[in-house]
Amino acid sequence: MQLLHDFWDREVELRQIRLRLRSGGFGYVTGRRRVGKTATLVKACESAGGFYHQAVEGTPEQQLLHLSEEIRNVIPVFRDVVPRTWNEFFRLLSRERLPKLTVFDEFPYWVQGDPDLPSLFQKWIDHDLPGSKALVVVSGSSQSMLYSQFLQEGAPLYGRAMFRLHLEPLSYTWFCKALKYHEADPLSFVRFSLVGGVPYYWKLLSRGSAVRQADELYFQPSALLAAEPAQWIRDEGITGNLPKAILDLIGRGVNKPGEIAARLGVVQGNLSRPLALLLDMNLIQRELPFGESSRTTKKVLYRIHDPSLSFYYGAYLPNRSVWKLLSVRKRLDLLERHASRQWETFCRSLFHGAARYWEPKVEIDLVAPLKGNEKYIVAECKWKRLNQNTKQKLLEELKKNFQRTELAKKLSRVYFRVFSKEDLGKITGNHT
C-alpha cells in the first residue's frame, strides 16, 4: 500500500460549496462508493470552520449519543442535554446558532434507524433553517437511499435541496500525478484500468509491477477489491438474482438487451425494471449510436463504465480459479485485454458529445463533434503499438467503413484518426 496524500483535485467542487455558503440552505452530495465524498466534505468543513459528523449504523438512541458527543463542541446546549429522540434534537437545534457549514455524512444510516426522520428533517428545513443562513449538507454511501429521499416525488425531502453536488471519479492525469507515474507510459494506463479514478483504491496499489498489483488487489485471499462489488451492491439495497445476473453478463461483454434476455431465459420486457435500477445506481450505462436518440432508434448497448467494476466482472470472475496457473506473460496479456476495453471508453471521454456508432456490418469506436458541430472526428481506438504503415492502413479502412454508413450522409466535414498506445501522452496532455 502506498503512502499518499488524502486529498487530490476537487477544486471545482470546493468552489461550488464556497459559493453556496454565501446564501446557505440545504443540499446533498452524491457519488459512487469510495469516490471521495467524505474527504471533500471534511476539507470543506476545515476551510469554512464548519461541523462534520459521520453517522453510525445502530439505533436512534446510539446515533443521537454519538452526534451529541461531537456537536457539543460547536453547539453548547448539547453539553448539558443528550436528546432522546430526533424530534427533541431538532427542537434543540432550532434554538441555537449553527456553524456556517454543517455536514451530516452517512445520512441513510439515520433513516434506516428511524424512517420518520426525513419528515422531521423536512419540517426543520422548512421552518427553522432559512433564518440561520447556514448551509446544511447530507451525504452517504447508499446512493439509492439518497435518490429515494430527494428525487422521488412525494418523499418528505423532495424539492427541498437548493444545492446538489455530484462527485465523478478523478481523471487519469490525477492518477498519474498522485502516484508519480508517467502519463505517456502505457503501463501507467494498465494500472489505471485496475482502479479507475477512485482515490481510495489508489492507496491500495503497491509499487510493484502491474501483474503484482492486480494479484494483490483482486486475486490474493482476502483481496480488498474482490469484495468491493458485493459491498457496493449491498449499500445500494439491490436484492434478488436478476439484477446481479444482468450485471455479470454485461461485465462479460453481453451488452444487447436481446442477448441478455436470451442468456437469462427471460422475456426482454422483464429486464426493464432491473436495468433501470442498475442505471439509476450508475452501475451500468446505456449507449445509443452517435446522433441517435431513444425516440429515433431501438438500438441500445449496455456497459459497465467504472474500470474497477469492469475488471471485476470482465477479468477477475472469469479467471480467478486459473490466475495462479497462468504465466506472468499470460497474466499481463489478460491485463492488456482489459486495458484495451478501457481505452475505447477513455478516448471517448476526452471529446465532449462522443459516442460509438454501429450498424449491422459496421462499428466505429468514436464519433464526436468538433468546433461547434461544424466538423466531426471519426476514430478507431487500438490499444496496440502501431508503426506508421499499419496506422495508415487502419486509417484507410476506417474511411471506407465510414463511407458505407448512413451517418456518412449526415456528416459532411469529417476528420479521421487512429488512436494507439503512442498517442496516450499526447491526447491526455491536450485534455488536462
Image: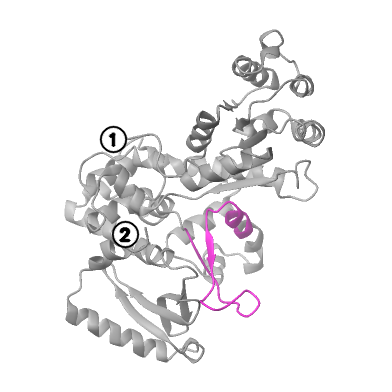
The residue nearer to you, when weighing 420 against 162, is 162
Q: Is residue 239 visible?
A: no
Q: Position of residue 318 (x, y in %)?
A: 36, 54
**Side of 333 where 223 appears, left or right:** right
Q: Residue at x 73, y 20 (%)?
A: 96
Q: Is residue 345 above or below residue 24?
A: below
The amino acid type found where label 1 is placed reads Gln
The segment highlighted magenta reads: 275-304
Q: Judge depth for marks 1 and 2 and give the one in front.
A: 1
The residue nearer to you, when weighing 28 against 395, is 28
SS at badge 2: helix
Circle 1 residue: 2
Q: Residue at x 79, y 41 (%)?
A: 156
The amino acid type found where label 2 is placed reads Ala
Q: Position of residue 240 (x, y in %)?
A: 61, 48
Mark 1 crowd level (few <14, some 14–19, many ≥20, 10 Å Cα): few
Q: Is residue 149 above or below residue 291?
A: above
Q: Position of residue 408 (x, y in %)?
A: 46, 89
Name the magenta segment's main secondary structure.
Answer: loop
Q: Is residue 253 above or below residue 46?
A: below
* Quadrant (top left/top right/bottom left/bottom right) for the N terminus: top left
Circle 2 residue: 339
Name the quadrant containing residue 64: top right
